[in-house]
Every structure is written in C-alpha cells, then in structure tokens.
Image (tube, rainbow, N blue to C red):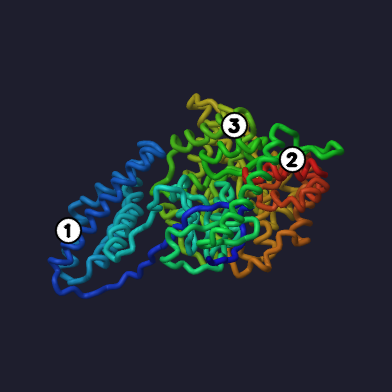
Amino acid sequence: MLKCSGKSVLKGIAAGKIYLYRKKEFVLTQDKVEDADAEIKRFEEARQKACGQLEALYQKAVKEAGEEQAMIFDVHRMMLDDGDYLDAIRQKIRDAKVNAAYAVSTTGDEFAEMFASMDDDYMKARSADVLDISKRVARILMGADEEGIDSREPVILLADDLSPSETMQLDKSKILAFVTKGGSTNSHTAILARSMNIPALVQADVELKEEYNGLTGVVDGIEGIFYIDPEPAELTELLNRKKEADQAQAQLERLKGLDNVTSDGRRINVYANIGSVEDVDKVLASDAGGIGLFRSEFIYLGREDYPTEEEQFEIYKEVISKMGGKKVIIRTLDIGADKQVGYFNLPKEENPAMGYRAIRICLTRPEVFKTQLRAIYRASALGTASIMFPMIISTKEVRQIRKIVEEVKQELAAEGKPFGEVELGIMVETPAAAIISDELAKEVDFFSIGTNDLTQYTLAIDRQNQKLDGFFDAHHEAVLRLIRMTVENAHAAGIWCGICGELGADTTLTKTFLDMGLDELSVSPAYVLSVRKAVREI
Ligand code: PEP
Ligand code: MG
C-alpha cells in the first residue's frame, strides 16, 4: 500500500480502480529517410487511423451534442481525403526524403497559412482545421496519439496535469475522482472538478507508474490523501469513512427547501456556479436559488470552431428553461489565460493572465461578442436571464458594452425576435474595478466579485502557479478590504453585490460576508448546502 498526500479540491471520498492518464508529448524532428515509398506507406496507415478516430469522434459527438456539433469531425475526415493536401505531403517525403511526421506538419503549416490569407471567411476558418488534422496524423506517426479513458467502469484518473479543454473532453461518466501531480487549487481544472462534484487532489506527491494502472485506489478529499492498493483492513476503514462522509452529506440534504437565513433573520441568496448544461441537474439537486455564474467560455472549449448563435441559443435556452424562472447569470466568454481555444488564433503572450483575454477580446472582436449576446438575449425570452462581463477595469468599457448591447437589442427587435428584461452586471475581479466600484456602480445593475482573479491580481500571485499556493492567501486583508469597499459602493448606488469566486464557499468567512452585507454567494453546487448550514448557524 502507498499513501500520497495532495491538496484537496473537493471534500469527499471516492474508491475505485486507478486509471493512469498519460499525455504523450512529442517533439517533432526532421529525419532523413532512405526508403521514401515505405515512409509514404507509413503515412497512409496513419491517415487511415486518423480517419477511424474521426469517425468514432463523430459518432460520440452526434450522441452527446447533436448532428450540427458533430459535423466538424466529418469535415476533418473529408480534409484528410483532399488530393492537393495528400499530394503535397507525398511529394515532400519523396523529394526531400524527410520523415512523414515532418512532412505532414510542415504541409499543414503551409496550407494553414494559405487558408488564413484568403478573403473568404469560410476558407480562413479552415486554417485551424488543417492544422488540427495534420497534428492528429503527426501524433499517430510519432506514436503519441491522444488517449481517452479506455475502461468500462468509472475510474480514479491519475494524471500529470490536465488542461481545462482536456478535462472538458473526458467522458465524465467514467470519472470517480481526479488525482493530478500538477495543478493549483485555484485552477480552472480544479473548478471543473468541483462543478462535477467529484473528489479531487492536485499537487499529489505521487509518481505516475504504469504498475498503478488497474489497482484499487481511494481518494480522501477530506484529509488530502491518495491511497494506492490499500491493505484489506485499511480499505475497510476507508470505506467506513466514506460511509460517514456520505451520511454527513445526507444530513446536509435535510436542509433542502429551507431558507438561507441567520437566527436573527438576515437572509442571503445562495446560488450555484456552472460550466455546462449538464451541471444544471446538480444545481437543481443542490436546491440553489439560481445560477450566479455560468462560465460560458466552456461552450467554446474542446471544439474546432466558434459555436454558432443557434448552438448557443439552444444551450442558454435549455439552462434557462430548466431553471424554471430562477435567476441565471451568464458571464460572457472569458477566453484567454489558461483557457486557450485554437480557433481563436490568439497570439502567444509573455503574460497571458494580464493579456488579451475576456472582455478585451469581445470588445475588439465585436462579431464574436454580438453572436453570444444575440443568443443570450433570445434565450432571455424564456426565463430570467442576467448577463455579466468579466475582467472589467473601466467605465469606458461598460459604456462600450452597453452600446453593443443596444445594437443587439435593436437588431433583434427589427427581426421580430423576442427577448426579455436582462439585468446587466460586471465581475469585480480586478483591483481597478474594486477601487472605482463607486463609479462603476452607477453604470450597471449588479456586481459579482470574482475573488479568484481579484486575489491573483491584488497579491500579484499567479493562481495557476502551484509553487505559489503557499503564498496565495485569499483571506489577505487587502482582498477582504476590497470586497468590503465594493459591497459598500454597490449599496450606496442601490445595486446588489455578490461573490462568485471560490471564496464564497469558504464557510469560515460566511459570517464576515454577512457582516459586510453581501447579497449573494454563488458557489459550486457541491457547496450550496454547506453554505446554507453555515448561514443558518449564525
Ligand atoms: C473569479 O475570478 O473569481 C471568477 C469567478 O472567475 P474565473 O474563476 O472563471 O476566472
Ligand atoms: Mg475570473
């Protein structure tokens, strides 16, 4: 038996088989080949394998996301049949006598560049696709093709690290818990684990040994320990603790239907955070009063092209309708930093957390922004929708946003498309926004404080950098003062103010937040009832 410590992301216990998830990295090399015909044959076999993978992905996507979403995999398969592309690769192998992976990658780059320089928007968008298919074939050739979860039963996923888009692509029904060597407790992967309501440990002190694959593991998210192949007596004890944890959860379940009210009658809204339609069932099960943060950028991750207005409309419609009139606050896309999306073609940056991201992309790419706003406004006709904007630093940005929102409303009205009343708010997650919150409060209907980024920017500590977790102090007086100031300024202007960052779920601060006068706390569905319990005990 082996005991490894890690940082807990969600307090729960899970037991099951360990599944080693290895990301196979590959470094592209240019090698000379003697037998060009044999190399072309290798290329052909890899191409066939890629077509098979794309067919499987197409079938999975049809089932999980519908025909329209799945189409992209069909397009990719067709591109792998394109005569010009194939000829160019074969010619390179034959003439330059280079290895197939190198020929595929460089041909992919050349075609992508050519597509990107075309005037036609459709052809431009194919640039990312040709890169994608070339990468897929090159990976196969280098023996580094992607790995899914090849197991019939749900497993404990043991990985080096996972990016948000990798996490998105994994089959969630097959994951009992995550254990990663890397990752910080404030990363989006950790947030996703919380929203999936599964125990998870990051920064686990564990080696990724092949021999662990298939062994029994227990993730104790309460103590922050990962047990590999526990002795029978230890396993029995752990399973008993799991039973106790399940019982404590059952106790919390009794709070369903009750108010979030202190013994002296002070009320607060407890809402839930989501990243996808699938999370709504967990919100409803948690008895949250609404959705305080829908991280809409997850709609954009793990796909090959921009989601269309129709696709987004269907998603927002489903979330809003399922919530049956309860408030749904949709945050417009917060792409950038750790949430990278290939088809956005974002430039490489020295300092992405402070870079071209979130509202900065939306305000400079209004067509992308408007598509999303149109979809949200149309869905707002079916329930109670609010919109909030991430990474705001100035009133000028808010005015620019309002102008674009007005244009969208006028366009929809002219087209006879119905929409409802939509509250417009901002995330207060930069020190700038908190400091000028008195001015910003006059421009919007509400504030939602993003404590994850607010802490990162106030303390100048990268939330992704695991080495800094020891310095990352979300209880820092500077952060608490900024929160207090933001709430006071909101109330002075007559608007409401909530918290949607992870700190909202920290029950050691619930009393502090109530004293500050916060109107809402929006937390992962898994924490709704524990926050309710904390409020009711005050
Ligand atoms: C935050 O920054 O606190 C927040 C809620 O947004 P995200 O975690 O998605 O950056
Ligand atoms: Mg943020």
Marks 1 and 3, the one that precedes in the sequence: 1
In screen coordinates, is 207 left or right of 145? right
The reply to whether callout 1 and callout 2 are in contact (CB within 8 Å) is: no
Q: Which residue is mark 3?
A: 323
Q: Is residue 349 above or below residue 312?
A: below
**Which residue type does callout 3 highlight?**
Met
The quadrant the C terminus occupies is top right
Question: In the figure, residue 514 lies in which quadrant?
Answer: top right
For mark 1, what is the residue?
87
Q: Is residue 273 visible?
A: yes
How many residues crowd around disc 1 within 10 Å: few (fewer than 14), some, or many (20 or more)? few
Secondary-structure class at tag 2: strand
Label 3 crowding class (10 Å Cα cut-off): few <14, some 14-19, many 20+? many
Q: Residue at x 69, y 62 (%)?
A: 458
Q: Secondary structure at mark 1?
A: helix
Of labels 1 and 2, earlier in sequence is 1
Residue labelled 3 has its Cβ within 8 Å of some atom of ligand 1: no
Residue situated in front as seen by the camera: 287 or 314: 287
Mark 2 highlights which residue? 496
Name the residue: 17% across, 58% down: 87
Residue 334 horizontal/vertical position (percent): 55, 50
Are dots 3 and 2 in contact, CB under 8 Å? no
Is residue 209 positioned above or below 528 on the image? below
Q: Nearer the viewer, residue 145 or 314?
A: 145
Q: Position of residue 404 (x, y in %)?
A: 56, 40
Dot 2 beta carbon under 8 Å from ligand 1: no
Q: Amino acid at mark 2?
A: Trp
Whichever of callouts 3 and 2 sits on the residue coming sooner in the sequence is 3
